[in-house]
């Protein structure tokens, strides 16, 4: 990675975890004078046979895309008011990690700042980890903000824990 990074890519799924990662990415962009690229990946919805489909998958996918664009633009406007240069990109794919990596390559990202949801056990086995795949396959450094569960039984909200860097 060239220091300072010229472009920091921040994948968002609009969760509290990705908000924390966005805060870290925005802070780095502010400190280094970097451009910030906000990315959201909409899941590709398979076309079902007319005999079993109860809704129009294409329209639903378009609505998800429009909603994501609207949310990213609002976040970008808020960050721009703080003096940051921000762009947005909405991808559509079945494999979220691969789409994030494709967008990072396409935009020549110097750093990816991503959150992990802290899944463990069978959840992680069943669903995999987007952040883990991004770390393994990215051609640029990746900063991972890991979520950890609170020690309290009655508190279920994950918190921001440690920061890990690849490459």
Image (cartoon, helix red, strand yellow):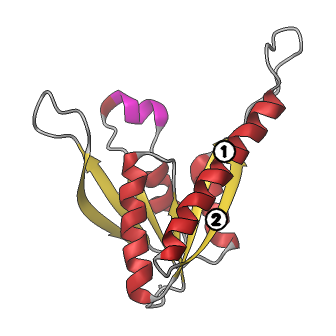
- Mark closest to the chain's N terminus, 1 or 2: 1
- Check disc 1: other Cα within 10 Å, few if <14, some if 14-19, many if 20+: few
Q: Quadrant of the C terminus?
A: bottom left
**Viewer-proximal residue among 83 and 105:** 83
Residue 145, image x, y percentages: 33, 59
Residue in view at x 74 percent, y 38 percent: 63
| Residue identifier under label 2 | 88
Answer with the quarter of the image where residue 44 lies.
Answer: top right
Q: Residue furthest front?
A: 81
Whether residue 35 is visible: yes
> For the stretch drawn in magenta, what is the main secondary structure?
helix
Q: Report helix, strand or loop for mark 1.
A: helix
Residue in view at x 82 percent, y 20 percent: 48
Q: Is residue 155 left or right of residue 36?
A: left
Answer with the quarter of the image where residue 62 lies.
Answer: top right
Q: In the rendered structure, which segment of residues is drawn in magenta?
A: 122-127
Residue in view at x 32 percent, y 44 percent: 118
Whether residue 98 is visible: no
Residue 6, image x, y percentages: 54, 86
The circle drawn on residue 67 is: 1
Q: Is residue 67 left or right of residue 8?
A: right
Q: Report helix, strand or loop for mark 2.
A: strand
């Amino acid at each position: 990675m060239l220091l300072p990074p010229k472009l920091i890519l921040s994948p968002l799924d609009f969760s509290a975890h990705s908000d924390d990662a966005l805060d870290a990415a925005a802070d780095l962009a502010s400190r280094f004078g970097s451009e910030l690229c906000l990315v959201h990946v909409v899941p590709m919805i398979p076309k079902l046979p007319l005999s079993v489909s109860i809704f129009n998958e294409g329209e639903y996918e378009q609505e998800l895309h429009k909603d994501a664009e609207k949310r990213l633009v609002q976040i970008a406007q808020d960050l721009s008011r703080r003096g940051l240069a921000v762009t947005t990109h909405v991808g559509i794919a079945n494999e979220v990690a691969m789409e994030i990596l494709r967008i990072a390559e396409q935009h020549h990202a110097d750093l990816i700042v991503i959150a992990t949801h802290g899944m463990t056990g069978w959840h992680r086995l069943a669903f995999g980890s987007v952040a883990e795949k991004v770390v393994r396959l990215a051609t640029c450094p990746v900063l991972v903000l890991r979520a950890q569960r609170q020690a309290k039984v009655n508190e279920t909200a994950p918190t921001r824990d440690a920061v890990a860097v690849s490459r």
